[in-house]
């Protein structure tokens, strides 16, 4: 595995290839990331993985400075997973001057759900992904479906800018008890880790209610929020949305015929000091 730290070195190495596959990460890798790497491996003639903790997508009160950096372990895992090139630029390399040109996603998608609770988050995500795409120039890129809204955002950005990149989603990997794998799971205390599975269980309970014929979406969401709050969580949202655009479904879309193909449940909640997100298509 080749490790490169500069854009010039990356471009020089990739000039020998025609179909790079790409997996962008912020490091602190777990099995979910490695599954994306293995998914991407056969899709190109060279596989590039990036590790870059992107300051632009962190709010001032969030965990940029304390976000886990596990460089040696990450390198070992990536080499075992078949990564060909690890691109690990410094902040100065990727942002040599203030990044005043930003990618501004549409408010109807960027200012809801995660964007509502983390203002400016998707500006930071889209800007760094666009910049990484410019560096790697991949033909295919793989992102995790756990970040459902982010995956939708990247796909739309690629389509609207006519980028020659196929954006694929990788299924969410889960611990045996159902907790979605996440780098931020490392923040959980043993007690909070035991409780953390309740987020995915809440989404499953909502899905079961929909399949059983529940039609009052607002009541379903309110009950799920109240149940998590009663267990000591601080939920931001537990919602039913259309898969196509993450908008609230119309009454005629919440039917047994639509449930299996048109809707997605999304949740974000804090347990202790750790904020978790999850989703479930129904």
Image (tube, helix red, strand yellow):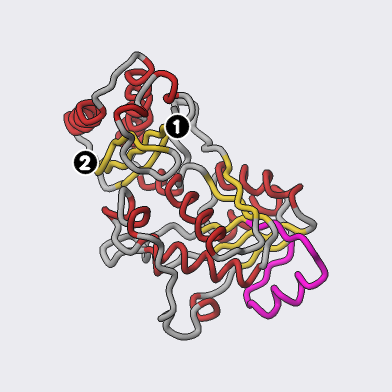
The spot of residue 249 in percent (x, y) is 33, 35
Looking at the rendering, the stretch of residues picked out in magenta corresponds to: 1-22
How packed mark 2 is, by other alpha carbons closer than 10 Å (few <14, some 14-19, many 20 or more), is: some
Nearer the viewer's eye, disc 2 or disc 1? 1
Residue at 54% in and 67% down: 130
The spot of residue 77 in percent (x, y) is 64, 50
Image vertical order of residue 70 relative to residue 260, above or below = below
Q: How many marks?
A: 2
Q: Quadrant of the C terminus?
A: top left
**Distance Cα–Cα, label 2 vs label 1:** 28 Å
Q: Name the residue that disc number 2 marks.
A: 234
How packed mark 1 is, by other alpha carbons closer than 10 Å (few <14, some 14-19, many 20 or more), is: some
The spot of residue 160 in percent (x, y) is 53, 62
Residue at 21% in and 41% down: 234
SS for callout 2: strand
Q: Name the residue that disc number 1 marks.
A: 262
Magenta span includes 3: yes
SS for callout 1: loop
The spot of residue 99 in percent (x, y) is 43, 79
Residue at 53% in and 53% down: 155
Residue at 67% in and 71% down: 4
In the image, taking residue 86 as reference, residue 203 lies left or right, namely: left
Image vertical order of residue 231 relative to residue 54, above or below = above
Which of the 4 image quadrants contains residue 227?
A: top left
């Amino acid at each position: 595995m080749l490790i490169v730290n500069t854009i010039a070195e990356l471009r020089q190495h990739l000039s020998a290839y025609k179909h790079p596959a790409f997996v962008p990460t912020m490091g602190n890798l777990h099995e979910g990331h490695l599954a994306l790497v293995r998914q991407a491996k056969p899709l190109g003639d060279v596989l590039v993985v990036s590790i870059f903790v992107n300051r632009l997508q962190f709010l001032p009160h969030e965990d940029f400075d304390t976000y886990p950096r596990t460089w040696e372990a990450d390198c070992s895992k990536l080499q075992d997973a078949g990564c060909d090139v690890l691109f690990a630029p410094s902040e100065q390399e990727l942002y040599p001057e203030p990044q005043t040109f930003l990618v501004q996603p549409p408010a109807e998608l960027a200012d809801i759900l995660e964007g509502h609770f983390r203002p400016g988050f998707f500006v930071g995500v889209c800007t760094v992904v666009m910049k990484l795409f410019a560096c790697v120039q991949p033909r295919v890129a793989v992102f995790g479906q756990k970040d459902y809204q982010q995956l939708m955002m990247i796909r739309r950005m690629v389509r609207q800018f006519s980028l020659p990149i196929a954006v694929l989603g990788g299924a969410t990997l889960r611990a045996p008890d159902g907790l979605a794998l996440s780098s931020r799971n490392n923040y959980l205390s043993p007690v909070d880790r035991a409780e953390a599975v309740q987020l995915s269980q809440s989404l499953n309970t909502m899905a079961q209610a929909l399949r059983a014929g529940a039609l009052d979406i607002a009541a379903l969401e309110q009950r799920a929020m109240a149940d998590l709050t009663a267990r000591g969580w601080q939920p931001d949202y537990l919602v039913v949305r259309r898969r196509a655009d993450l908008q609230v479904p119309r009454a005629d879309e919440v039917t047994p015929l639509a449930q299996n193909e048109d809707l997605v449940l999304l949740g974000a909640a804090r347990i202790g000091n750790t904020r978790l997100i999850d989703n479930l298509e129904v």
